[in-house]
Amino acid sequence: MPALSDTMNKGRLAKWLKQPGDKVRLGEAIAEVETDKAIMEVEAFHDGYLAGPLAGVDHDFPVGEAIGYIAESAAEAAMPPSAISAASPKAAEAPIAVQTLVSATSDSKEPASQTAAAPSHRASPRDDDRLSPRARALARHASHARAHAEPVHEPQPSPSGEQSKPAPQELAASQADLSAGPAYRVERASSLREAVALTMIAAAATPIFRVSAQFALEGVISLAKEKGLSLTLLLARACARAVAAHPLFNSAYTPQGLARRERVDVGVAVDSPEGLITPVLRDVANRPLSELADDWRQLREKVRSRRLQPSDYRGATFYLSDLGVFPVVYAFDAIIPVGASAILAVAASRKEGTFFTLSCDHRVIFGGDAARFLQSLSEWLANPARLMDQAMVK
């Protein structure tokens, strides 16, 4: 299982694009893996033939754990593991140098990478040298499989996530007690939903206050229709320009001080079939709207196809959540993702005005700051033609 991003610690095997015996070339896609935000391709690391045993689809595997093998020849790829193990029993006792396909048992307290302890006996160099790299790996797999008669394929806790993983007591406090209720079944969450849950638990430690305002959006809605632009895009532009005028909203709290960013990158919450995801529009205050519109179209397409890359959804400095497409939503507030200081929640547009609720990190932003930000935002929304200008006009 390769590390497809610098924060990835496990992946869910979604599909094999090649089958055992197929010839593969360096860089060719051989499988698809579901990470916490997207489905990404796994590429062959050298020329050869895909060989089994292949890991099962719809299971989670830690980064670094073997999910299949690439043999040097078609004959070797066709050789079953049992034949390799029988051909060299001593090789099956060799220390495990690669991750095996069998997960650690569920009561293990060590990471999966540490549960495969090396056996006490070592094969002689002469026996081991007669086997190819793939044969040695399969022999090790066979030995480890015998030591785990009842392999567990359930997801294992990972040492880290996109955000800092909550402590065990935090997770326990957030779990429901189902013992007194009706019968139930546990349905494994998707990688995306699991990532969102952990992110929200981490975000719960942020001290938040909220300020609401009511703005008229008729002018912005008319401009969006006239120019063929997304209303969400124009709202993101208005937010970015208000943020640029109030740099605290582009900062993030750290124990060392405030991290002040030099560019406004807006993360826009999107409701996808798999759950909530926030693709990021870059430099929203200054870039031409035509470029931003093209980026937004591509990001939405990637969300639909689950092809977002980490660079598409990481690093937002301000967040926008727009539920205006649902007429029943009168008002709501949103949770600030870790790494930002504010998120703006936009409800459905009404004749009497649209409710905007600004959630702020109180370590960075105070009440007066929030009021001044909303005042600036109201001025941008009241003069939407100014949003079309490339140059920032305060």
Image (cartoon, rainbow, N blue to C red):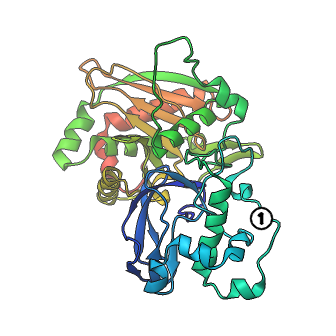
| Residue 285 in view (yes/no) | no
Q: Is residue 309 above or below residue 340?
A: below
> Depth check: 283 or 275 in front?
275
Q: Is residue 23 above or below residue 290?
A: below
Quadrant occupied by the N terminus: bottom right
> Where does residue 67 sit, x and y in percent of width and height?
53, 64
x 62%, y 59%: residue = 145
Q: Residue furthest left?
A: 226
> Depth check: 97 or 248 in front?
97
Q: Residue furthest top?
A: 180
| Residue 182 in view (yes/no) | yes
Q: Is residue 347 left or right of residue 201?
A: left
x 52%, y 73%: residue = 69
Q: Is residue 380 left or right of residue 318?
A: left
> Where does residue 139 sit, x and y in percent of width and height?
63, 72
> Where does residue 176 sit, x and y in percent of width and height?
57, 21
Q: How many marks?
A: 1
Q: Which residue, given by chain and number where applicable, does mark 1 sit on?
A: 118
> Where does residue 180 sit, x and y in percent of width and height?
55, 11
Quadrant occupied by the C terminus: top left
Residue 138 figure quarter: bottom right
Q: Could you tell me the amino acid type at mark 1?
A: Ala
Q: Secondary structure at mark 1?
A: loop
Q: Is residue 294 above or below residue 109?
A: below
